């Protein structure tokens, strides 16, 4: 199965800088067999749509509104994102949970909105340092997954990619070890398959994210059950990101 590499730009680069980024990035990955996705600020969508439509690379949003439309100044809806040519949206990133007070219920609502307009979802889940140190990782993952996926049908799961991102590993340079990732992946699969009575675990696509860079990515991508990577800081350098994608 082709691996996924998702680059999360967060609030970095201007649209002009993103154009120059693509000038450097695209020639480097011509032969790449990876599923590459950029999660971009909405200001970059028009450039992504123009420049990526002739490639296999897809782009998506970093967040969407939990509302359909109306008086929500500053928000961007799922249908707006879809109409710009996006393939997916991130939902439940720890930064949107923290800075924008996203709740588990609003995350569930966002997922339902995204799926309704055929946007795929990359749902981020992960434990805090405290939860890990008090052996509550599985409990925390279960709480996040149960509410986020509430009310969905089993056949909608194929449109959802789970990104396992320990909160303490995001942007810190710290990563879990291989065993810790393996065990979190097993937990995520068993939580989802229990709720949806899925027998075939392998149908659930799970990425690892958190302080991935050019020097450490191979150990994570090789972990059983890991279908790819969600890369933040390291995706901003077109050379490094191309090397990871290749
Ligand atoms: P990082 O971010 O790679 O900079 O740790 C990952 C993410 O936030 O998705």
Image (cartoon, grey):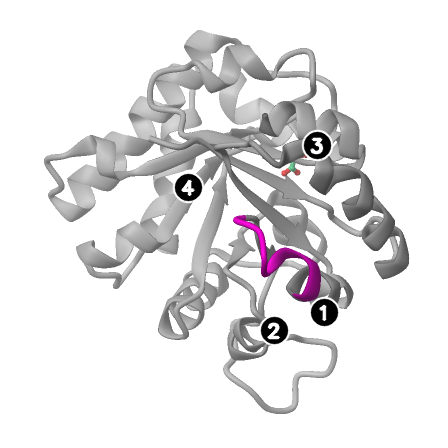
Q: Earlier in the sequence, mark 2 or mark 1?
A: 1
The residue singled out by tag 3 in the image is: 28
Q: Which residue is mark 4?
A: 162
| Any part of residue 61 in sight | no
Q: Which element type, helix, strand or loop, lies under badge 3?
A: helix
Q: Nearer the viewer, mark 4 or mark 3?
A: 3
Image vertical order of residue 19 relative to residue 21, above or below:
below
Quarter the N terminus occupies: top left
The C terminus - image quarter: top right
Answer whether labels 4 and 2 touch (C-beta < 8 Å): no
Magenta span? 50-56
Mark 2 vs 1: CB contact within 8 A: yes
> In screen coordinates, is 141 left or right of 167?
left
Q: Give the quarter the ligand 1 occupies.
A: top right
Identify the residue under disc 2: 84
Residue 213 horizontal side relative to residue 4, left or right: right
Residue 108 in picture, x, y percent from top left: 41, 61
Which residue is pictured at 10% across the width and 35% down the height?
199
């Amino acid at each position: 199965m082709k691996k996924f590499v998702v680059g999360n730009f967060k609030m970095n680069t201007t649209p002009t800088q993103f154009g120059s980024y693509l000038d450097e990035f695209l020639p480097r990955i011509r032969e790449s067999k990876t599923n590459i996705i950029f999660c971009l600020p909405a200001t970059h969508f028009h450039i992504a749509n123009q420049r990526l439509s002739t490639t296999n690379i897809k782009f998506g949003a970093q967040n969407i509104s939990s509302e359909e439309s109306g008086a929500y100044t500053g928000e961007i809806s799922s249908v707006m994102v879809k109409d710009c040519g996006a393939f997916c949206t991130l939902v439940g990133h720890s930064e949107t949970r923290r800075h924008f007070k996203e709740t588990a219920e609003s995350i569930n609502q966002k997922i339902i909105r995204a799926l309704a307009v055929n946007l795929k979802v990359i749902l981020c889940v992960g434990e805090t340092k405290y939860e890990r140190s008090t052996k509550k990782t599985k409990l925390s993952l279960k709480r996040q997954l149960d509410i986020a996926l509430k009310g969905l049908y089993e056949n909608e799961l194929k449109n959802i990619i789970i990104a396992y991102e320990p909160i303490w590993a995001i942007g810190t340079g710290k990563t879990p070890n291989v065993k810790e990732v393996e065990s979190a992946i097993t937990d995520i699969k068993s939580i989802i398959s229990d709720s949806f009575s899925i027998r075939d675990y392998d149908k659930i696509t799970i990425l690892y994210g958190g302080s991935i860079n050019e020097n450490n990515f191979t150990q994570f991508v090789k972990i059983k059950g890991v279908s790819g990577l969600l890369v933040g800081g390291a995706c901003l350098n077109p050379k490094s990101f191309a090397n990871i994608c290749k």
